[in-house]
Image (cartoon, helix red, strand yellow):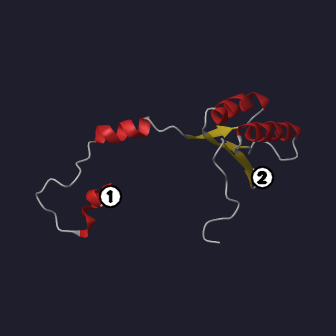
Amino acid sequence: MGLMDDLLGGGRAPQNTGEYVELDLDDVETAAAETRMRVHVAAIEGQQDVVAVKDAIYGGDIVIADLTRHSTADRTIERVIDELQEVTHEVGGDIVQKADDQLIVTPGGVGINRTKLGQ
């Protein structure tokens, strides 16, 4: 029986045998703080914002970049997308544009499924 069964009681009536795991909220907070990958949301307003996105990707994090202040025909955004494509290629990550206003950029080892769930 696994930890999840222990936590949920495994469908059995509780017994006073000490087989249940007691959760300490401090342990849960510590585990979250030790998470290695994070998801960041970034607003891309210009070329200067690319540095922080690149740093996050090189650091192994995922970035959802908001492009709403620019049209996709804007030359600045074309340069931003080109630069982020290069970064994802370097680290073995992935990049996809969602509609006209968002980019999802991932580090190495994380792919983006192009099919919506349930389809």
Residue assigned mark 1: 2
Q: Residue at x 88, y 46 (%)?
A: 73
User: Relative to residue 85, is residue 52 depicted above or below?
Assistant: above
> Mark 2 packing: few (<14 Cα in 10 Å), some, or many (20+)?
few
Q: Residue at x 71, y 42 (%)?
A: 92
Q: Residue at x 75, y 27 (%)?
A: 48
Instruction: Depth check: give the residue in front, 28 or 12.
Output: 12
User: Relative to residue 104, is residue 8 depicted above or below?
Assistant: below
The image position of residue 25, as x and y in percent, is 29, 41
Mark pair 1, 2: CA separation: 44 Å
Q: Nearer the viewer, mark 1 or mark 2?
A: 1
Q: Taking 17 as reference, is 96 left or right? A: right
Type of the residue with mark 1: Gly
The disc at residue 115 is none
The image position of residue 77, as x and y in percent, is 82, 40
> Mark 1 packing: few (<14 Cα in 10 Å), some, or many (20+)?
few
Instruction: Depth check: give the residue in front, 95 or 89.
Output: 89
Mark positioned earlier in the residue sequence (1 or 2): 1
Helix, strand, or loop for circle 1? loop
Residue assigned mark 2: 100
Q: Residue at x 26, y 46 (%)?
A: 23
The image position of residue 69, as x and y in percent, is 76, 41
Quadrant of the frame with the N terminus:
bottom left
Q: Residue furthest left?
A: 16
Instruction: Depth check: give the residue in front, 108 or 44.
Output: 108
Q: Quadrant of residue 81?
A: top right
Helix, strand, or loop for circle 2? loop
Q: Quadrant of residue 45?
A: top right
Type of the residue with mark 2: Asp
